[in-house]
Image (spheres, rainbow, N blue to C red):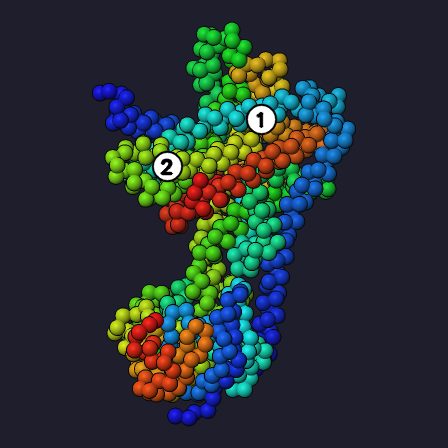
Amino acid sequence: MSNSTKLDIQNLNAWFCEKHALKNVNVKIPDKEVVAVIGPSGCGKSTFVRCINRMHELIPGAKASGKALLDGVDVYGGMDVMDVRRKIGMVFQKPNPFPNMSVADNVVAGLKLVGTHSKKELAEIAEERLKSVGLWEEIKDELKKSGASLSGGQQQRLCIARALAMNPEVILMDEPTSALDPASTAKLEELVKKLKNEISVVIITHNVSQAARISDMTAFFYLGELVEFDETRNIFEHPKNPLTERYITGRFG
Amino acid sequence: MPRRNSRFFNLQDSVFKYLLIGVSAFVVLLFITLFYMLIDRSFPSISINGLSTLTGTVWNSAAGIFGAVPAIAGTLFSAVIATLFAIPISLGVAIYFTEYAPSRIKSVLSLFIDLLAAIPSVIYGIWGLWVISPLIKIYVQQPIVGAIGFIPIFAGPAYGLSIFLASMILTIMVIPIISSLSIELLGGTPPSLREGLISLGATKWETVRHVGIPFARLGIFSAIILGLGRALGETMAVTMVIGNSYLWPFETSSLFAPATTITSKIASELYEATSTLHIASLIELALILLVITLLINTVARLIINRTIKRGYY
Amino acid sequence: MDILSRRGRERLIKYICLLLTVLAVVPLLWIIGEVVYNGVSAINLEFLTALPAPFGESGGGIGNAILGTLIINAMASLFGIPVGILTGMYLSEYDRTSRLGSAVRTVIESLSGVPSIIFGIFAYSLIVLTVRHYTAIAAAFALGLMMIPLIAKATEESMKIVSNDIREAAIALGVPKWVRTTKIVFSIAKGGILTGCLLAFARISGETAPLLFTSLFSFYWPIGIDQPMASLQVLIYNYAMSGFQNWVIKAWGASLLLVIIVVSINVIVRRFAKPKYKAGV
C-alpha cells in the first residue's frame, strides 16, 4: 500500500508545562488509510493526536512545536486554527452529542451553527451522513429527538456523522469504542473500515487486537516517542523493536 | 472561501470577547462609582460635622445638628439581638431538617424557609405594624410593664412600635439566612464520619453534636455573620415598626420605647431633606452602613466559600 | 423515663428542634394568612384598574401602582438581565483567572451583600440629584443593579456545569468561540439562567427602599419614565403608615398581589429547576 501522504508530521514536540510529552515525532500519515495508534497508558498517543488538530494547545500550560503538513500546508501557522479543525475532524472517547439539539441538528451542527447552508441542504446532508454511518434506518423516525437520547453506540456513530458532515480530509478518533458494548464496537469497526475509502483515519486504541483488525498501518508509541511505524501486518508478525513486541504480546501496558 | 470565512469569524470572536470584557468592566466601574458617589455626596457632612455625626446624640436638621448615635445604637442593638435570638431557632431548624425530618416534610420545610426569605420586607412591615404591634402591646408589653416596669429597660409606657418589636421582626427575617446555610453545611458532613459514629450506636443528636456541628462550625459562624449583615441593612420592616424617634436609648432606655436605626432614619427623612448638609449627613450615615455591611459580608463569604469547597474545618 | 438518659436526651432534643422549627414556620403562615385575609376583601375590578381616590374619600384603586411596578420592573430587567448574563458568560467562558475576572467576582460578591437602601441612595445621588427631580429611571437603575449579581452568579454557575466534553466537541468542529459560547453552552444552561432571572425578578418586585427616593410615588397614571411613578411596594409603605382605613385596606390588597407574585415565582422555580437555586440568600 503506497498511497500518497496526507499528513506529514515533522519534528513534533509537545509539552505539558515542563513535562516533555512528545519527543521529536516524525511520521507520514498516508491518504485514505486507517492508521492505528497504540501504546501503554501515558505514552503520548492522545497528545500526539490532539496536536494534529491543535486541541493540545487548549490545555493551560501546554505547548507544541514542529510541523504538521496537511497536503503541504502547515497546520501550525499555514492556516487559521478554525480551518484546521474543519479539515481534521475528531471523535472522542466518550460520545458527546449536543444535548440541546435534535439528532438531525447534531449531524449538521458544524455547518448550521456557522450558517453556511440552507435548511434544505442541511436536511439532505444530515440524511446522507446518517446513512453513511448506518444510523439512518435506525432513527429516521426519531430525528427530532435530542441527540443525547440515543444509546451509547448510536451516540458515537452520531458523533462520527457530525464530524464527517464537515467533509474533513482526516478524521481522528480517540479510543472511540472504549465506552461501548461489544455489539456497538463491532458496528463501529465496520464503519471505520468503510470510511477509509473516503478519508484518512487515525484511530487511537488501547485494544491491540482492534488495531490488528481494522488498521492498515500502526504506530507504536512509548514514553513520548514514536518507536515503530509500519504496515500493521509487519508490526504484528515481525515487529522490529523489542519494545513493540513486548507490548503486542501483552507483557506490559 | 475558507480563508475569508476564518477572518470573519475571528473578527466576530474579537467583537464578542470585547463586548463581554466591556460589560464586566462596566460592572466593576459601577461599584467604584457607588463608593465615589456616596463619598462625594456625603462630603459636606464629613467636612463640616466631622466626628460629631458619630458622637452626637441630638439630631436637629433645622439647627444643623446631626448627631447619629441613637440611630447607630438602634441599628447595632436590634441587629445583634435579632441575630442572637435567631441562632438557636435557626440551628434547631437546621438540625431538625437534616436529622429528624421525614422526606415529605423536608421539601415543604425547604420551601417555607425560602419563602421566609422571599417575603418582601415591606410586607413584614405591614404585618408587624397592623397585626403584631397591637398584640404585642396588649399581651406582652403591658403585662411586663405592669409586673417589672420598675426595671428601666422594661419601663412603660408600652408603645407597640418600639425597638423591641423591631428586634422581634428582624429575628424572623434573619432565621432563613442562617438556617438555609446551616442546612447546606450540615448536609455536607462527610458520610464516612457520620457513619463511623452511628455504627458505634450514637444517637442522631450525638452525631450532630460531635461530628456535624464541629465540622460545620466555621461555616455556621459565617452564616451567623451574614445574618447579622442582613439585619444591619434591613430597612422597610424596621422603619414601619420601630416608631422613628430619638427617645431611645438616651431619654429612656426602655425596650418598649420607639427608636431609630440608620436605615429607618434615611428612609423616613431623605425625601423631605432640603438642605445640602441634611442630605449629606444622611448619605454619610449610608456610607457608614455600607462600610460595616461590606466588611461583615466579605469576611463571612470568604470563610464560607473556603469551608464549603474544601470540606474541612 | 430518666430525662438524662441518652435516649431521653435524644427525644428531648428532637422535640426541642421540632418546636423551634414550628416557631420559625408559624410567622410565615401567619403573614400569608393575614395578607390573604385582609387583602382579599380589597380586590375587585375597580381596585385593579382605577386610580386612587382623593384622600379621605372611599373607593378608588391602585391601577397606577400595578402598572408602575410593571414598568419599573421591566426597565430594571432590561438593564439587569443582559448585563448580568454577559458578565456571567465572561466569568464562565472567557476569564482565566485574570485580574479583571477576580475584580468582577469580588464586586459581584460584595454587591450581593449591600443593603438595598444603598442602591437607592446611589441612584438618588447619581441621577435624582443631578437632574433635580425624582424619576422612575433612577428606580429602574437601582433595581437593575440589584439584579446583576444574582443573574451573573446564576449564569456563571449554570454555564460552568456544562460538561467540558461538549465544549471539546464544538471546538473540534471548528465552530467560532462566540458561537460555541452562545448557541451551545448558553443554550444548554438556559434553564438555570432563566431560574436566576425569575428569582431576581421576584426579589426586586419586593424591594421598596430603593424606590423611596427615586421613583417616589404618584397618584396618577405613569406619564413618563423620567417622572415619579407609583409602585406597589411604595404604595404599601405609604398607605399602611397613613392610618387612613380605606388606604390601609388597599395596602393589604396590594400586599396580597405582591405575595402572590413572589410566592408563585418561588414555587414555579422549585418545581422546574435544580434544588441549587434557592431564593436570594
Name the spot of residue C65 as percent of width and height, x first: 55, 39
- Label 2, residues with CA under 10 Å away: few <14, some 14-19, many ≥20: many
Compute the Cα span from label 1 to label 2.
33 Å
Quarter occupied by residue B246: top right
- Tag 2 subunit: B
Secondary structure beneath label 2: helix
Say if A140 sits above or below B127 in the image.
below
Name the spot of residue B245 as percent of width and height, x first: 61, 20
Secondary structure beneath label 1: helix
Is A183 in front, or is A33?
A33
* Label ID, residue C76: none
Disc 1 residue type? Thr
- Residue hosting label 1: B75
Instruction: Kindly tell me whether residue B115 is visible in this rendering.
Output: no
Left or right, residue B46 beside residue A41? right
Same chain, marks 1 and 2? yes
* Label ID, residue B212: 2
Give the quarter of the figure containing the N terminus of chain B.
bottom right
> At 48% from the left edge and 10% from the top edge, which residue is drawn?
B145
- Tag 1 subunit: B
Say if C15 sits above or below C260 in the image.
above
> At 44% from the left edge and 29% from the top edge, which residue is drawn?
B87
Give the quarter of the figure containing the C terminus of chain B.
top left
Name the spot of residue A85 as percent of width and height, x first: 50, 75
Earlier in the chain: of badge 1 and badge 2, it is 1
Disc 2 residue type? Gly
So how many labels did they put on this image? Answer: 2
> At 43% from the left edge and 60% from the top edge, which residue is drawn?
C163
